[in-house]
Amino acid sequence: MDINCGGVVDGRISIAQLGDAIFKRMLECASGVPSKSEVNGYGQNEFVPWQLGVIT
């Protein structure tokens, strides 16, 4: 995953700060910066919420 949200649970970061980080990362990816899954060659297969069957 591109963003670790665990900092909210243990109090290292606020929800507002994390929201800003998520928004910034979304803009980066929308502008062409590869996501972690793209860098590692996973493509679209590791997280597809609309997938109706088994991924082979």
Image: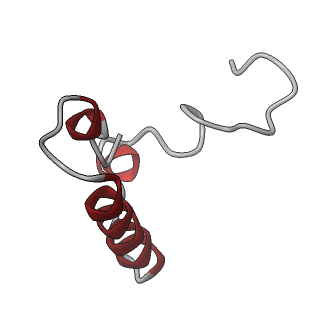
The relative height of residue 11 versus residue 16 in the rendered view (above or below) is: above
Residue 46 position within the rendered picture, expressed as x and y whole percent measured from the top left: 54, 31
Residue with the most extreme left position: 12
Between residues 23 and 12, which one lies in front from this camera angle?
12
The relative height of residue 18 versus residue 27 in the rendered view (above or below) is: above
Residue with the most extreme bottom position: 31
* Residue appearing at x 30%, y 51% in the figure: 39
Between residues 37 and 18, which one lies in front from this camera angle?
18
Residue 40 position within the rendered picture, expressed as x and y whole percent measured from the top left: 30, 41
Q: Quadrant of residue 18?
A: bottom left
Between residues 17 and 53, which one lies in front from this camera angle?
17
Residue with the most extreme right position: 52
* Residue appearing at x 80%, y 33% in the figure: 51
Between residues 8 and 47, which one lies in front from this camera angle?
8
* Residue appearing at x 18%, y 29% in the figure: 10
Q: Is residue 37 left or right of residue 47?
A: left
Q: Quadrant of residue 41?
A: top left
Q: Is residue 45 left or right of residue 2?
A: right
* Residue appearing at x 39%, y 51% in the figure: 38
Q: Quadrant of residue 5?
A: top left
Tally of marks: 0
Residue 2 position within the rendered picture, expressed as x and y whole percent measured from the top left: 32, 48
Q: Where is the C terminus found, in terms of image quarters? A: top right
The relative height of residue 41 versus residue 31 in the rendered view (above or below) is: above
Q: Where is the N terminus found, in terms of image quarters? A: top left
